[in-house]
Image (tube, grey):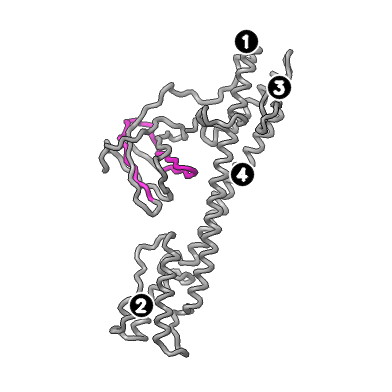
Amino acid sequence: MSRLNESERLTMIDLHLPHWSLADALAGGPIVLPIINPDGTPGTYARADLVAQRAAYQTLSDAILALEETTLPALRSERDDIFGIDGTDVDGVWIRLLSYKSLVVARLGARHALARTVPNLGLIRVSDYLNIIERFHTHWLRVNAALPVAAPLVVGPLTAALLLARHATLTAKLKEVSDAELELSVKRADREQLFGDEAAEVREPNSIIARLLQYHATIAGNFPGQPIADTLPRIFPQEAASLPRFDFNWRDLSGGQLKTWLRDPGLNDAAEAHLEEGAVTLNQAYAQGAPVQAQTWAGVTMVGELDVLELRDATGHTIARGRRDTTLAEV
């Protein structure tokens, strides 16, 4: 449950760098922290190491931004272009499948069994793209078998073979999207581990936060009552010792959808609901209203309990944390 939002993190580090420079220049400096390296050997950590970790954090943030704003939107657009953005997209499969039934009826007659068993497009979701194409392709092969060999069914520019080729192209594109989504999740997790804005018991000991906490302790211990100790920049924002709690419950709607509902804690500054489940991190707008409010989340597959449900203000700070109450009735 992070206390610093993304826009505050580099600023917080940048406030410590000049402070460390001043501390290095004092009698007793430079400040070098004794540490244990990841391989278990003893090591040291100085201001230059904080600069290096800041650069690594920036690199991860840049890569995440590129995935979020460029790579994934482009891949998802290419994926949807293959199937069709909607039923009017002339370059997609969707518009051709809308015409499929009428052409089957025209070729075989309305009384033919194949004309009466044409697959239905149903609810079209990304997760259904391949299944829809597979069902139509299987049916199409049977239609062609019922027609003269020299005159197979053609729907605009689309043949059964070309539909199968679209399936192969779409399969490859879906994997590209999935791989990029996994890469994004891993990089987000790597960035969180590097920064260390987590509970103390799970915080990586070589994270930026862990090192800055050690720096604070060193400065306070070496220079008690001196200006350098009194001017230590804050690591975490000022917040109440105990945040308000609210009750919530959830239900898995299947298909990657999750419904949550929560008892509104009556906080006027609540601006968004924040959910975490494994590597998935989602936000949606929240407005004070009904005593119990419901949210629907896409792209969430539940494993065990929900990790986190919070309310945050407009700046991204957590202002209330949820605890599950299985008796809270669904709305």
Q: Which residue was labeled with disc 4?
A: 62
Range shown magenta: 257-283
The residue that disc 1 covers is 224
Secondary structure beneath label 2: helix
Q: Estimate the x, y position of residue 268 in percent, counting from the top left.
A: 35, 31
Depth order, front residue of 34/281: 34
Quarter of the image with the C terminus is: top left
Q: Is residue 7 above or below residue 42?
A: below
* Residue in the foreground of this view, choosing between 304 and 183: 304
Q: Is residue 275 magenta?
A: yes
Q: Earlier in the sequence, mark 1 or mark 3?
A: 3
What percent of the width, then of the height, locates residue 167? 49, 69
- What's the amino acid at mark 1? Pro
- The Cα atoms of the two marked residues, 2 and 3, are separated by 75 Å
Q: Which residue is mark 3?
A: 32
Name the amino acid, label 4.
Asp
